[in-house]
Image (spheres, helix red, strand yellow):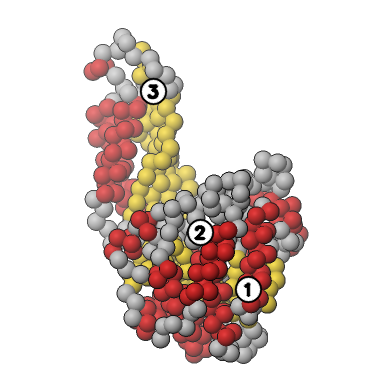
Amino acid sequence: MTGRIDGKALIRAIEKMATLTDQSAPPFTRRAFTETYLRGREWLKSHFETSGLDVKLDAAANLIGRMEGLDRDRPPIMIGSHTDTVTGGGRYDGILGVLTGAAVASYLHRSGQSLRFPLEVVDFLSEEVSDYGAVSCVGSRAIVGTLSQEMLLRNNPNGETLKDAIKRMGGNPDLLNAPLKKRGDIAAYMELHIEQGPVLDTAGIPIGVVSGIVAIRRVKITVRGQANHAGTTPMKARNDALVGASQMISLVHDLALDWQGSFPLVATVGRIEIFPNSPNVIPGLCIMDLEVRSISEEEIDTFLDQVEKAASDTSAKCHVSVSFETASDAYPALCSENIIATIKEACSNLGYEYLEMPSGAGHDAMHVASIAPIGMIFVPSVKGLSHCSEEFTKEEHIIAGAEVLLESLLLLNEKLDVSYAKLLK
Ligand SMILES: [Zn+2]
């Protein structure tokens, strides 16, 4: 059954949020911790209230709208995302997850329905990379206890610490030395988000059922040659580190382009340093950062093995040495099999075509996954554009996403009741 979501009201809410933008910055800008952000939250608070939610701020200044269930003692089913943006960002990234959550609550409120579980709709504090030492997902980290004391003491360019900023937003950072929630405190978590990539838009499919949020492996690649005079060294006598590095970049690109694994994989060399970086010196040293993303860590391993094997050809051909060092490794956050199946069932019930896909971008859900079963619903981003003012999702897709979120919630409410212990896995 579709038509339960008040689509017009949902679109009006998105348009309203878009007007709450920093006038001195490019549209659409609502950076966390700013006056504009607070104005956005003030409006959101009243919007939550008219959607039938009781609103509070938790110790991390996450804005939480709650609707009691038939059984108050149960942990809530949580729906969330974020309302902060990057500078010159969009009208949909994060905002859609929060406002569709409110639209779902509004339907339950209007129709006088109560779920068995309490429902919480959350606007997580500062999901985007913040001005406080680049900490991101501040609110969702605090919930699961990965917002460290070191992060809380980082400061913005004006010298304000993240701790003080959270206090200014209405939180109580003194309580953030322990997780705000533990396993079992959230029955299930769902997040609707724009895809931020071109896959659904290109395929003409309205709903993405997210399998998980990819693992990210960063590897430092060092190419060593010999710095030497650019005028006097014959071409055949060179050990040009940059030529070796450029071959490595092409190699990484080609191997990822031809990737035949079971899961999608992307690989990028996004940063390079050249020494001595001078027009009349043959580069003697290049240091590059390679980033590989896939839902499967095994496939990332296999890919990197292929890169390392192929690097020996580059070494021989360019008379350089190539070495690899893992710089960081973020685990994938897999969505719950049960919630994936529930979202698919919701799509089938409502007659929407869907595609199961990984999320190549990080989200608040990735943090929540450490303590609760998660599920994510993607809606198409026109031309895959995001983090820019052109970011756009069609009304029909926004409403389809909200309907799927509602149907998934209703199904989950039933299923959790039957096999609650099983779903908590
Ligand atoms: Zn987002």
Label 3 or label 2, whichever comes before in sequence order:
2
Foreground: disc 3 or disc 2: 2
Say whether residue 169 is left or right of residue 283.
right
Q: Can see residue 183?
A: no
Residue 284's disc number: 3
* Proximity of marks 2 and 1: CB atoms separated by less than 8 Å: no
Q: Disc 2 designates what residue?
A: 91
Front one among 132 and 301: 132
Disc 3 crowd, CA 10 A, few/some/many (<14, 14-19, 20+)? many
Mark 2 residue crowding within 10 angstroms, few (<14) / some (14–19) / many (20+): many
Residue labelled with disc 1: 48
Left or right of residue 14: residue 240: left
- Quadrant hosting residue 144: bottom right
Q: Where is residue 34 in the image (x, y as percent from the top left)?
A: 67, 52
Q: What element carries label 2?
A: loop
> Marks 3/2: CA distance?
46 Å
The amino acid at mark 1 is Phe
